Image: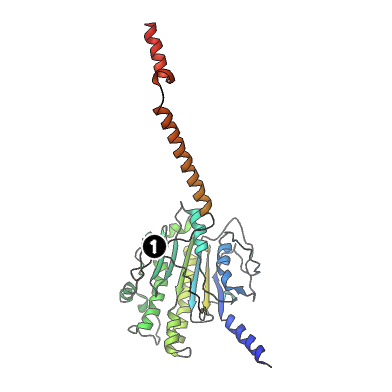
């Protein structure tokens, strides 16, 4: 008789195995502290609203305040970590449980930035180091042109003298182990992003909002291989927490305290019989040699309007050119042209 209740409890535990944390937030953007669950599929809407963009469906979630509508954050950093339900990344963080943790994409936010700030070329970076998926737009191609994005580049980067291995504390992780190396490459990517961006601090002062989306799956790989109770998993969780806290502090400092840094920690995405959607698209500027696809943007709702405007303007111009050309071809110079008419009159007067 208690089986249904136990089933509901198990479902609740499975649904709550995810966490949305706000590590850094500007003073004009208020996240209210509370235990308000956020639907996993609405996380992109929270990002969009916090950046000042509208969403198609109203979000009645009390965790996000109004803030200053005339001063929105210059950057939003969203880090997705799989393999752990929650990471202890700071004492001042604000966290919310996530209901129905499903794979999400921020392509809608990227499209909004493209449509509103295309001329100012904002920095857009989406990166999944282990899966070798990268997408850069605008000035990101200049800022992160030296960023290691393939596994071969990441391995070479770890062997350099100024890599993260020289500054990491003692742990059970082994640099020559493939699984450990993949995890360490993600920590290296976090450090390289802030290092390269610090050389272009002037980009953090423009009016165009920047967005960064990072997918870190190295901790999940360590958990699958060694187990959740292993020393390596505990050391990796500690190192990742410290790296994320430093990454958040650096990004917040680069943007002058006007940036939002968020972390979504999920144990695993349970999506049976459903293809996991990718939030990082393929780009010609930095191609993925391991993928046979060349994906482009998903068209937004303005595409049909712009297409029809351009189409009918071109049709109207084409018809106007045809009509003018036809009339000029069939014109009688001695009768229709004012030039010839005035010339004839002058000849007769002479």
Residue 31, horizontal then vertical, whole percent = 61, 68
Q: Is residue 315 left or right of residue 66?
A: left
Residue 287, horizontal then vertical, whole percent = 35, 65
- In this view, the residue in front, 98 or 199, is 98
Residue at 54% in and 61% down: 73
Residue furthest to the bottom = 1
Residue at 61% in and 84% down: 11
- In this view, the residue in front, 98 or 247, is 98
Badge 1 marks a residue whose secondary structure is loop
| Residue 109 in sight in this render | yes
Residue 162 in the image: above or below residue 320: below
What is the total number of numbered labels drawn onto the structure image? 1
Residue furthest to the front = 330
Residue 347 in the image: above or below residue 140: above
Image quadrant in which the N terminus is located: bottom right
| Residue 89 in sight in this render | no
Residue 45, horizontal then vertical, whole percent = 57, 65
Q: Which residue is mark 1?
A: 283
Q: Is residue 15 left or right of residue 163?
A: right
- In this view, the residue in front, 67 or 154, is 154
How many C-alpha atoms fall within 10 Å of the one at disc 1: few (<14), some, or many (≥20)? some
């Amino acid at each position: 008789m208690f089986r249904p209740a136990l089933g509901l409890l198990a479902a609740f535990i499975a649904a709550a195995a995810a966490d949305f944390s706000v590590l850094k937030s500007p003073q004009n953007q208020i996240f209210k502290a509370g235990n308000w669950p956020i639907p996993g599929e609405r996380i992109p809407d929270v990002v969009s609203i916090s950046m000042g963009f509208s969403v198609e469906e109203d979000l009645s979630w009390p965790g996000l305040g109004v803030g200053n509508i005339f001063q929105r954050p210059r950057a939003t950093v969203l880090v997705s970590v799989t393999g752990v339900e929650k990471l202890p990344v700071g004492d001042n963080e604000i966290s919310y449980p996530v209901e129905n943790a499903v794979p999400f994409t921020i392509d809608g936010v990227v499209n909004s930035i493209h449509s509103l700030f295309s001329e100012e070329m904002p920095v857009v970076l989406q990166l999944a180091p282990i899966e070798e998926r990268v997408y850069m737009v605008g000035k990101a191609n200049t800022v992160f042109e030296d960023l290691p994005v393939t596994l071969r580049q990441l391995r070479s980067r770890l062997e350099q003298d100024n890599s993260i291995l020289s500054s990491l504390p003692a742990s059970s992780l082994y640099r020559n182990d493939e699984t450990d190396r993949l995890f360490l490459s993600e920590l290296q990517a976090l450090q390289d992003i802030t290092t390269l961006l610090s050389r272009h601090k002037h980009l953090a002062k423009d009016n165009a909002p920047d967005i960064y989306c990072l997918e870190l799956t190295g901790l999940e790989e360590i958990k699958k291989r060694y187990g959740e109770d292993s020393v390596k998993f505990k050391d990796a969780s500690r190192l990742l927490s410290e790296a994320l806290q430093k990454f958040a502090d650096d990004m917040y400092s680069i943007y002058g305290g006007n940036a939002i840094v968020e972390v979504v920690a999920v144990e695993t995405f349970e999506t049976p019989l459903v293809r996991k959607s990718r939030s990082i698209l393929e780009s010609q500027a930095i191609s993925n040699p391991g993928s046979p696809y060349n994906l482009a943007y998903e068209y937004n709702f303005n595409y049909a309007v712009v297409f029809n405007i351009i189409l009918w303007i071109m049709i109207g111009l084409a018809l106007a050119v045809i009509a003018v050309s036809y009339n000029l071809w069939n014109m009688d110079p001695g009768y229709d042209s004012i030039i010839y008419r005035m010339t004839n009159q002058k000849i007769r007067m002479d």
